[in-house]
Amino acid sequence: MGKEVARKPELDKLRAADVDRHKIAEQLKGALDEGRLTLAEYDDRVSQAYAARTYADLLGIVDDLPQPGLSADEVHARHLAEERRAVRKLPTALMVLWTIYGSIAAINLMVWFLVVMTAETEIYPWPVWLLVPGAALTATTVGVQSIRSRQTRQRR
């Protein structure tokens, strides 16, 4: 028989403290000062914040507001940066192929180096043939990335 481990409750289900409610109220005050909320919306949300019991209740009150101090241009710039980062990121299949290729190339070069160091005659540089699949993989990667980039530009 093993020990039973008590499961931790989800963060959203945990009860909120007065300090947490006050922080949300301060964030709402900042949104009011920035003009993101009307006075009626502010009053409604502050009353919801002080009536909230869990973190899920509190976070639901401010989930449509950006971080305090961010302008619309900054929010838009962050969104564009995230899109560019997603396009630049290699698909999983290509990451796997590059990992396999790199491993095979490293092993081949190490074996070739050990053979050259221990042999008394000249050894044909056979690892140079690894450049062929490397070039094919590079061409595939460039093609996939350019297609993804073009598709992203067309969506905008």
Image (tube, rainbow, N blue to C red):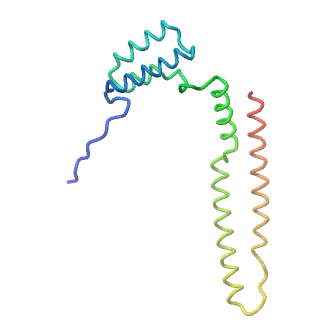
Looking at this rendering, what residue extends furthest in the bottom direction? 120
In the rendering, at what x and y percent does residue 44 appear?
43, 9
In the image shown, does 36 or 2 lie closer to the viewer? 36
Placement of the C terminus among the 4 image quadrants: top right
| 110 horizontally vs 21: left or right | right
At x 34%, y 16%, the residue is 51
Name the quadrant containing residue 132: bottom right
At x 75%, y 45%, the residue is 145
Would you place residue 1 above or below residue 73 in this image? below
In the rendering, at what x and y percent does residue 2 appear?
22, 53
Name the quadrant containing residue 78: top right
Placement of the N terminus among the 4 image quadrants: bottom left
Looking at this rendering, what residue extends furthest in the front direction? 33
In the rendering, at what x and y percent does residue 149 appear?
75, 39
Q: How many marks?
A: 0
At x 67%, y 36%, the residue is 81
In the image shown, does 75 or 140 lie closer to the viewer? 75
At x 66%, y 46%, the residue is 91
In the rendering, at what x and y percent does residue 40 appear?
48, 6
Looking at this rendering, what residue extends furthest in the left direction? 1
Looking at this rendering, what residue extends furthest in the top direction? 40
| 131 horizontally vs 38: left or right | right
In the image shown, does 73 or 149 lie closer to the viewer? 73
| 22 horizontally vs 112: left or right | left
